[in-house]
Image (cartoon, rainbow, N blue to C red):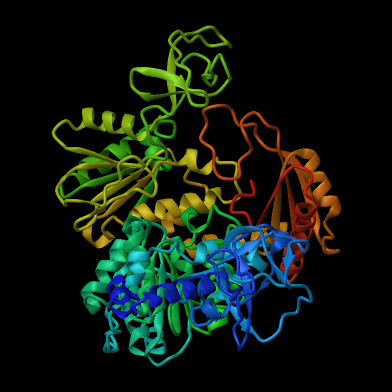
Amino acid sequence: MSSENERQGGGPEGGAPEQLALIRETVRKAKVPKAKPRTWRGAALAKELPVARVVVNKGVLHLDQFFDYAVPEELDADAQPGVRVRVRFGAGARHVRDGRREGGGLIDGFLVERRAESDYSGPLAALAGVVSPERVLSAEMLSLARAVADRYAGSLADVLQLAVPPRNARAEAKPSPEPPPRPAPPEPGTWARYPQGPAFLQALGTGGAPRAVWTALPGPHWCEEIARAVAATLASGRGALVVVPDGRSADRVDAALTALLGEGRHALLTADSGPERRYRQWLAVRRGAVRAVVGTRAAMFAPVENLGLVVVWEDGDSSHSDDNAPFPHVREVLELRAAHDTCGFLLGSTSCTVEAAQLVESGWAAPLVADRTVVRAAAPLVRTVGDGELARDEAARAARLPSLAWQAVREGLKTGPVLVQVPRRGYAPRLACARCRAPARCGRCAGPLEAPDERELSCAWCGTPEADWHCAECGANRLRAQIVGARRTAEELGRAFPAVPVRTSGRDHVLDSVPGQPALVVSTPGAEPVAEGGYAAALLLDGWAMLSRPDIRAGEEALRRWISASSLVRGQDAGGTVVVVAEPTLRPVQALVRWDPVGHALRELAERAELNFPPVSRMAEAIGRPEAVEAFLKAAQLPPEAQVLGPVPLPVPGPGRPRRPGDPPVGEHWERALVRVPPGSGAALAAALKAAQASRLARGGGDPVRIRIDPPDIG
């Protein structure tokens, strides 16, 4: 009531103002149940389904369960399954008032279910609030997150952190567009180059769920072929999800889908989009306005409605393995989605990983490959430093750029750009004594010396400059490059071909594309730009540096990098040539010459089976301080068939070295133990490790131990 009404409604003695004051005082003193934003003391509960089951945002394993909360009547309409909520957590049973639990700290969570009764017999705390009425967590996504958490011995809350992006209020307030009508089924296009390609598209277009491991032909057509597979799925009334390793690949698939279907039919989910635009696109997918998604690693959990196809491109790329707990891999998550949603599955790459070969060998997926005659025509001619070259140039085997490589560069520059792949970036990443070849070490921390800049010599670990270096073995003071970086290679080639422009592409500056004019393009693996019309030739330098890594995947990874770069070169019919500078008798080099990544993967799979190594077996790693790892393994109730390998000490990281998530702290001695089980026991192993970790965390004692299922690097 306004003050003007107060003046007009009073009697001669002014009784109305006194009566109004009395009413206000009565209301102020009345003990009416009233909801407060943080604590609900005596607030009325919802009449129907007054219990909310919530997963709280606590990633610790011993709290990996649902918690029941009371639903206040004022939140009844908004507190629906799938919304974000705020709850009080950690109050304890002693903080109870009028039958309601109070206190505790505010924490975020997701409401997953409304129930009539609670399984918990004690007093319940009430929901503190509903963050937003937007339902961001579906029952299907919750089931998938639970399956991923169980497979990787992690918590549901950690998986939901990866699956559901942070809220953006402005993006949430904007409505999503209406879903477009179904597109027409696409023509096979370049899928006709594969014998089973048109049948695969037809199966997707008619509502089928084919599973295929696709060995793509070299060239630029792979993104268009993915777009046609997505279009065929959309034509059947279902959704599609494509996950690629980086933003450049996502942009290529995005452009191919736009050219084929037009604007508004798919969403692009990458880190480059920004939080508001990314969340707006994600909401459009969740609301059903968009049924096709292209994105990088985080898009593997995109909530596509009525999912009909999942696609992963280049599954061997390390970007597909998440660095956050519980460390899921895109390939495994999409396999789970294909099984849970009964949808199509397409694993594509110009190369072939051992895991992809196992999917075919087990019968879970069918091979999708081209005939050998088509492969030979599409692939470039691959040459190595063989016996004939050695007869003409005896120093060719030891030379970094033998005469064969110089000849390929000269011939290639006549018709177009030439790609030069160098395993390392920088100028001279590793140095050695020019006289005795002993590695150059820092006098302070014994770290390797490097020359990121031509004029400065410094330690790669602690960064200390080294102005007056002398070899500790022979006393010499001259250095030579042990591993030459991309910048030094570009400088050498620039002096050899002064009239040709030289471009570099690496971690600090990655080129998306280069024109088709003659030029030298020096790139590190994975940063190769696309050339208009394809490269005329390519040099794959320092092959020994990639093959000599102490890793079981060294040969597979080197072949994948080589084939990825060689796929950007023109085919044999157009005169494309690739020269690989590596020992020609090695298996990965021979697989590159024959362009047979599938054969190489099958042979690697057979050897892994003999050694009982992944992916034939399931394996987990435990990393931490020696005493912590030992105590953890003793407490874990491992399956009877489990075999413990190690523990073995990890390299002690020095100061100034780059650290990956989960690496030991500087100067600390950590150990790693591997636990191996045969096929069929992977779920039991994950459950045992998760239970042991949860028990340690519940007791709250001891140093941390990091658990990772199926680690990408096992040495």
- Front residue of 2/198: it is 2
The answer, for residue 587, to whether it is visible in the render is no
Regarding residue 410, the answer to whether it shows in the image is yes
Left or right placement of residue 617 versus residue 183 in this view: right
> Residue 689: where, in percent of width, then height?
75, 59
Q: Residue at x 52, y 74 (%)?
A: 27
Please tell me whether residue 518 is drawn above or below residue 395 in the rendered image.
below
* Above or below 518: residue 406: above
Q: Nearer the viewer, residue 265 or 611?
A: 265
Tell me: 412 left or right of 713.
Answer: left
Q: Nearer the viewer, residue 433 or 319?
A: 319
Residue 573 coordinates in the image, percent (x, y): 24, 62
Label tally? 0
Q: Is residue 197 left or right of residue 415?
A: right
* Residue 508 spot, x, y in % from top left: 34, 39
Q: Residue at x 48, y 66 (%)?
A: 164
Quarter residue 424 falls in: top left
Vertical relation: 127 (above or below) 305: above
Left or right of 145: which side holds 64?
A: right
Q: Name, please, the residue furthest toward the front.
A: 13
User: Between residues 548 and 454, which one lies in front from this camera angle?
Assistant: 454
Q: Give me the residue at 59% from left, 54% from top.
A: 712
Point out residue 334 in the picture as x, y percentages from the top left corner: 52, 71
